[in-house]
Image (tube, rainbow, N blue to C red):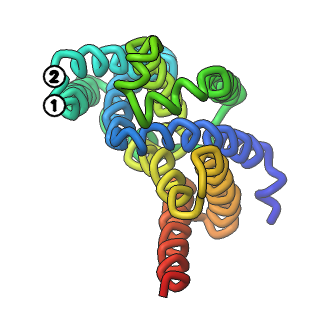
Amino acid sequence: MEILTAEFFQRALTGGLLIGITAPLIGIFLVLRRLSMIGDTLAHVTIAGVALGFLIHANPIWVGLAFAVLASFAIEKLRKAYKAYAELSIAIIMSAGVALASLFFTLGIGYNTDVLFGSIYTLSREDLYIVGAVTLVVIAMVALFFKEFFLLTFEEDAAAVSGLPVKMLNLLITVLTALVISTAIKIVGALLVSALVTIPAACSLLIARSFKSSVLFSVIIAEIAVVIGLIMAGIWNLAPGATIVLLLIGMLIVILVGKKGLAA
């Protein structure tokens, strides 16, 4: 249990708790808008940015974040170009991200599993400042535009007719998603980051009776998984990102079984 008092573990716990707020907070909007795969897309683009950061000896987190934000603009541009096939924008950007990541890795830095599976125990104070800043921005934007995001999520056409700046709001959600994904990669890894965005939302939608309660439940579920997952990983020397995600899947199974039992 000594690991629980170690400074690196406390930094990991702080970073995990912050991502446990932002990922499901954005995730609930993405899931309801059927854009769950955007998390995977931006994760792959962020990998490319991280790889380039190592290659040019720049801070990989900042470069990855810049790549993710640029990709969010590209996704919105392509969504406008393919209005009837909006999912094409996600597939195109993901392909570009995978190709660039592969190119940058082979050019100079080799294979880095931390990018794929996360390295939450290596979080520095600078990393925490970045995650903390992103958390404040996401909470502030969601609080400020909550009603607008709600209408955009369920009735985009009605939002446009009522005079809301739909293009700006769509872009804002995508950029916020890019910020969350790029900062979450070091915590749970590119291969698992989408799970932290979508699974808490999937759990909350099964038990919530209103949209506001679904947002609240998704954050609570993510935080429980982060805290218990990190403690389990620290005590039993498990992969922290994978432990958190498997706990989330376990919680989803329990909720599904519980609802089925109640229905019976």
Where is residue 134 drawn, in percent x and y? Answer: 62, 24
Task: Residue at 38% x, 38% y: name it.
Answer: 33
On the rendered image, what quadrant is the N terminus found in? bottom right
Which residue lies most toward the bottom here? 264
Q: Residues within 10 Å of mark 1 (few under 14, many from 20)?
A: few
Q: Nearer the viewer, residue 40 or 78?
A: 78
Task: Residue at 82% x, 61% y: name it.
Answer: 2
Q: Quadrant of residue 109?
A: top left
Relative vertical location of residue 163 with respect to residue 215 in this rendering, above or below: above
Relative vertical location of residue 57 with respect to residue 213 in this rendering, above or below: above
Where is residue 257 drawn, in percent x and y? Answer: 49, 80
Q: Nearer the viewer, residue 54 or 185?
A: 185
Relative vertical location of residue 39 with respect to residue 101 in this rendering, above or below: below
Question: In this figure, which residue is indicated by the disc labeled 1?
Answer: 85
Where is residue 144 drawn, in percent x and y? Answer: 65, 21
Where is residue 112 drawn, in percent x and y? Answer: 38, 39
Q: Name which residue type carries label 2.
A: Tyr
Question: In this figure, which residue is indicated by the disc labeled 2?
Answer: 82
Task: Residue at 36% x, 20% y: name it.
Answer: 72
Q: Give the structural element (helix, strand or loop) at label 1.
A: helix
